[in-house]
Image (cartoon, grey):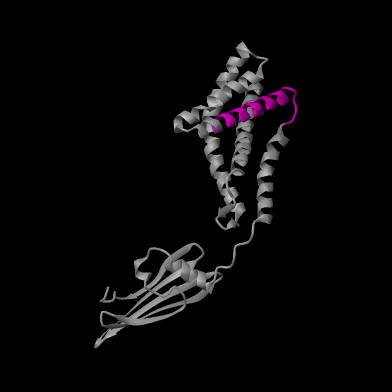
Amino acid sequence: MERLKNFTLRKMITTIVTTIVFSLLFVFNLSIVEVDVDGVETTYNIRNQFFGWFIFLSMYVGVIILIYGNIVSIIIEKIQTKWFPNHNWLYILILGIFGLVSGFIFQTGLFALLGMLAAILYGIIDKWLSNRMSKNKSVKLFLIIPIDSVFLCWGVLTLISPPMPPFTKEDAIEFATSGERAELIHFPNKIGKWEGNIAGYQVIRETSVNGIGKEKYIVTFTESWSKGNAKGTRILAYKVKRGSLTMNQYEGTNPPYY
C-alpha cells in the first residue's frame, strides 16, 4: 500500500512540476513586446499577459500529461522493470519518442518537437524523483520551487511593466467612434458640433462626454434636424470604460434623410 501511495505521489508531482516548468519556458518564448516599423513599442500589463498565457498552457499541457503522459510512462516503466531496469536514459528516450505523437495529431513539426521536449522533461523529473524517494529524501521543496517561480516571475513583470496611461474623455470618444457602428460614423470624433445641410434638412450633430467615475464616461451623440415644419432629434448615449462600450440611452427616431 505504501509503495502504491509513493508511486501515485511521484506521478502527480512529476505531472505538476513538468506542467509548470514547460509552461514557464514556453511562455517566456512568446512575444511580450510588440515591434513595429518605428522600433520597439512597449506592451502594457505584461504580467497579465504572462499569467493568462501560463494558465491557458498549464490547463492544456496539464491535461495531456495527466492522461496520456502518465499512461505511457506507467507502461514504459513496467517494461523497464522487466527488460532494462538500470537504463533510465532509455526510459527517457522512449518517452520522448511517444511525445512526438502530438505532431502527428496536429500535423505540424512544431507540436512534435514540443511534445518530445515535454516528454523528455517528464522523464528526467520522474526518474529524479524516483531516486530521491527511494532514498527517503524529501521532495516537497522540489514542488514548492516551481510554484514559487511562477509568482516570482509575476512579481518581476509587475515591477518592469509600465503602467497603463490614463483613459481620458478623448479616448472614450475615440473608442466609441472607432468601431463599425453605422449610426455613429457621421458624428464628430471629438467634443464639438457639426452643422450642415443634408437633402434640404438643416442638420446639427453634436458629440459630448461626461465623467461618471474613474475612467468611466457617458458619451452622448445628439442629432437634430429641421426642414420647414418638420423637426426631430435623436440621442444616442453610451457608457464607456477602457475596452467596454454599452448602450445607455436611445431616444428619438431615425432622421428622414438616412
**Residue 102 belongs to magenta span:** no
Chief SS of the magenta region:
helix
Residue 182 seen by the camera: yes
Q: Which sits in the foreground, 171 or 245?
A: 171
Above or below: residue 39 compared with residue 3: below
Q: What stretch is highlighted in magenta?
A: 114-138
Left or right relative to 192: residue 129 = right
Q: Residue at x 51, y 69 (%)?
A: 171
Which corner quadrant of the image does residue 36 belong to? Answer: bottom right
| x then y, percent, for residue 35 | 57, 53
Residue 73 seen by the camera: no
Q: Residue at x 52, y 73 (%)?
A: 169
Quarter of the figure that contains the C terminus: bottom left
Above or below: residue 138 compared with residue 47: above
The image shows a total of numbered marks equal to 0
| x then y, percent, for residue 229 | 24, 88
**Residue 122 belongs to magenta span:** yes
| x then y, percent, for residue 219 | 45, 73
Quarter of the figure that contains the N terminus: top right
Above or below: residue 155 compared with residue 258: above
Q: Which residue extends farthest top?
A: 83
Q: Residue at x 68, y 36 (%)?
A: 143
